[in-house]
Amino acid sequence: MRIVDFRSDTVTKPTQEMREAMYRAEVGDDVYEEDPTVRRLEELGAARTGFEAGLFVASGTMGNLVALLTHTQKGDEVFLEEQSHIYYYEVAGLAALAGVLPRLIPAKRGLLTPQLIKEYYRPANIHYPNPALLCLENTHNRGGGSVMRPQEMAGLVETARELGLKIHVDGARIFNAAVACECDVRELTKGADSVQLCLSKGLAAPMGSLLVGSADFIRKARKYRKMVGGGFRQIGIMAAAGIVALEKMVDRLAEDHRLAAKLAGGLAETGYLHVKSEEVETNMVVAYLNTERIDAANFVVQLAEAGIKINAYGGNRLRFVTHKDINEDDIEYALKVIAKLA
């Protein structure tokens, strides 16, 4: 049976060039900072995003956790959008391991504004925790791949500085945001104190993320990475794929966005799925079932039986994600299968 997997861009397979780079990779013990391939990846990631230094971590979740540990002390207050990945999908690491208090802010499509930050910020008071960090997400996962644009980022940076907050950006898909904005990614990281970016999603590396920031921040973060079990040895084998991801896979994200738009249009034509086309900015399509005949969870099961893999997104919402292993034929095939379920 033909399989078309829209569950996430995490299902991407490494390219042949990545596999060859992994085979040839020069390696060393990274805990001793002696892996030349890791050093090259970290330097490349920092340069691409406008920071002094980088740190290779196992995953986006590890990168976000290490950033929280580095920026805060136990009992600090951290500002997050209420459906942010750090809060929603990272197993309560911010509370269980970093020991910080999340200050949750609801925002349309996950996009925080200066006004919202000021509304939820509490001035110094003996009863309140210390406000320490603002976490942003770009693109926003549960916002359906929504994009925070350079001017919006600039406004949030200004507000955070006024309030004395540091800024960490969960930029798991920040290159998708840059491609959607047609801007240099550094326009989306400017003013942040740290950024986490994934290599293993749309960029198709088999594992890994980068945490970038100042040289002093990364020096401290390196120790926290060791604390949470991220002290790698000959990990240059994986870092080699990450180098290819950054050098070769960014520009092609535009194709994922194009296919997502095409998929959105086709889904809307089924008559029983509603798609807000104006919200399809990157490689995610959120569709809403507008029939009482079947709920989202059962719809996912029926599609899986036909070889189309998607995720339910809560309530009547469904999520489709395009990526490098989805092509034009896959979109047309999936739309035909879905149409038959109408």
Image: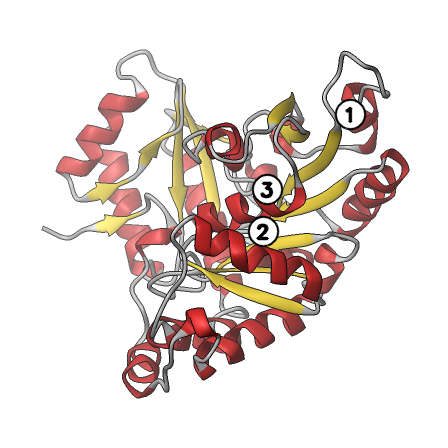
Residue highlighted by disc 3: 68
Give the residue drawn at x 44%, y 36%: 90
Would residue 163 be visible to someone looking at this image? Answer: yes
Q: Is residue 4 left or right of residue 139?
A: left
On the question of residue 176 being in view, the answer is: no
Q: CA distance from mark 3 to mark 1?
A: 21 Å
- Determine the residue positioned at 31% across, 52% down: 332
Residues tagged 2 and 1 counted as in contact (Cβ below 8 A): no
Disc number lying in front (3 or 1) = 3
Can you identify the residue that label 1 sits on? 116
Q: Report how far apart the C-alphas of labels 3 and 2 lie in the structure.
A: 14 Å
Q: Number of marks in the image? A: 3
Measured Cα–Cα span from mark 2 to mark 1: 20 Å
SS for tag 1? helix
Q: Which residue is mark 2?
A: 171
Within 10 Å of disc 2 (Cα), the crowding (few <14, some 14-19, many 20+) is many
Mark 3 element type: helix
| Amino acid residing under circle 2 | Gly
Q: Secondary structure at mark 2?
A: loop
Q: Give x and y (percent) for residue 20.
A: 29, 84
Tell which circle, 3 or 1, labels the residue nearer the N-terminal end: 3
Amino acid type of the residue tagged 1 in the rendering: Leu
Q: In the rendered structure, find residue 107 and report the number of the disc placed on it.
A: none
Whether pointer 3 and pointer 1 mark residues with C-beta atoms closer than 8 Å, the reply is no
